[in-house]
Image: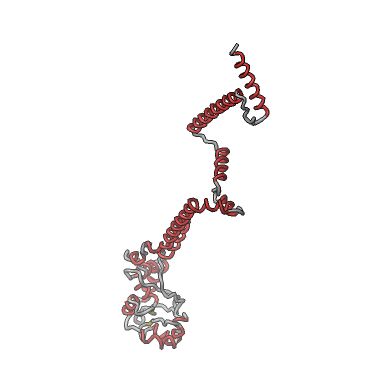
């Protein structure tokens, strides 16, 4: 029982303490109700962007309530916004997705995370002077990079960096402590105390109470309960139990056979001695009460032989 409870508690604590859980706001996007209606959520979420940027103008155009709320949390540049997110001064920072992906990939401890879908996606452009001789060469080379997959490889190399080894240090869970298994050990101690109490009560019953119950138990209820416990209430019942045990469970030890042979020999000697005493009594005219008819006939025959022998001796 203790092993089953201990295993159940260990499994529950393993799931609760050993599995790493990353807690963050799982936003569906910039149109998430916690962002678009920030005053309807308690506690309110602190988020901002850079004033007069493309992100700020888009939010001001389509999410006026959100834009008015986030003014108090705006930052002057992207690095300040990211640093405030790391220090928990801000819960979220809204800006261009490509820039945020790059900064997230460069985080040494991998504590930054970009969530939600992109909103109002636009492309980047490079301006050339009118009728520039480099325009066609640039477009051709850009198309070649795109067809060969070089642009995608460059994007993965520069925009999705790999986390540093320090990332594992922040995700290592604490080992299980003894305090988390107190309930199992309390159950074990309770079982030990209960077993000791029952053992003490059983000892007191067989030493002090049992003999008094045998005298006062007239209805037989206590005897029935005592038999259900595996012990007879009286000495006679204990003898019957011992006879049943000897009858049904024969001893296989050679010492038992030696003891049994010795007892049989003593019994035979006792029977012979009894017969001799019976003959002497009958010869003196004292008849012992015969146990059976056959035994009585045998006693009379022995008596005649004895008397005839004594009558011949004077002659």
The structure residue drawn at horizontal position 34% and vertical position 81%, both measured from the top left corner, is 129
Give how far across and how far down residue 233 sits, in percent: 55, 49
Image quarter where the C terminus lies is top right
Residue 156 in the image: above or below residue 120: above
User: Colour scheme in the image?
Assistant: secondary structure
**Is 214 positioned to the left or the right of 148 in the image?**
right
**Is 294 positioned to the left or the right of 136 in the image?**
right
Query: Quadrant of the rendered structure where residue 67 is?
Result: bottom left
Residue closest to the eye, 112 or 61: 112
Residue closest to the eye, 275 or 172: 275
Residue closest to the eye, 154 or 114: 114
Query: Would residue 137 be visible to someone looking at this image?
Result: no
Give how far across and how far down residue 65 sits, in percent: 44, 88
Furthest residue in direction right, as rendered = 293
Give how far across and how far down residue 225 sits, in percent: 57, 53
Query: Quadrant of the rendered structure where residue 244 is?
Result: top right
Query: Would residue 243 be visible to someone looking at this image?
Result: yes
Residue 222 in the image: above or below residue 243: below
Residue 297 in the image: above or below residue 199: above
Residue closest to the eye, 170 or 132: 170
Give how far across and how far down residue 264 sits, in percent: 54, 29
């Amino acid at each position: 029982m203790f092993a089953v409870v201990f295993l159940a508690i260990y499994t529950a604590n393993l799931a609760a303490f050993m599995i790493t859980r990353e807690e963050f706001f799982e936003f569906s996007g910039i149109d998430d109700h916690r962002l678009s209606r920030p005053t309807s959520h308690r506690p309110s979420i602190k988020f901002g962007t850079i004033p007069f940027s493309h992100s700020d103008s888009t939010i001001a155009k389509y999410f006026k309530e959100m834009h008015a709320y986030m003014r108090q949390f705006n930052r002057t540049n992207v690095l300040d916004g990211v640093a405030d997110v790391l220090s928990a001064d801000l819960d979220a920072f809204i800006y261009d997705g490509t820039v945020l992906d790059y900064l997230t990939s460069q985080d040494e401890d991998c504590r930054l995370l970009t969530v939600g879908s992109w909103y109002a996606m636009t492309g980047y452009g490079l301006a050339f002077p009118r009728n520039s001789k480099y325009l066609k060469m640039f477009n051709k080379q850009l198309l070649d990079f795109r067809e060969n997959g070089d642009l995608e490889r460059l994007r993965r190399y520069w925009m999705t960096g790999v986390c540093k080894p320090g990332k594992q240090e922040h995700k290592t869970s604490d080992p299980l402590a003894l305090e988390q298994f107190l309930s199992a050990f309390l159950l074990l101690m309770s079982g030990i105390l209960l077993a000791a109490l029952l053992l003490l009560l059983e000892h007191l019953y067989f030493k002090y109470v049992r003999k008094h119950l045998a005298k006062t138990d007239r209805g037989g209820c206590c005897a029935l309960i005592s038999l259900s416990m595996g012990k007879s209430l009286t000495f006679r019942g204990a003898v019957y139990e011992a006879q049943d045990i000897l009858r049904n469970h024969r001893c296989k030890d050679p010492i038992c056979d030696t003891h049994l042979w010795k007892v049989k020999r003593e019994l035979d000697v006792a029977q012979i001695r009894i017969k001799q005493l019976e003959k002497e009594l009958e010869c003196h005219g004292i008849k012992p009460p015969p146990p059976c008819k056959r035994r009585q006939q045998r006693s009379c025959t022995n008596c005649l032989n004895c008397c005839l022998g004594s009558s011949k001796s004077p002659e």
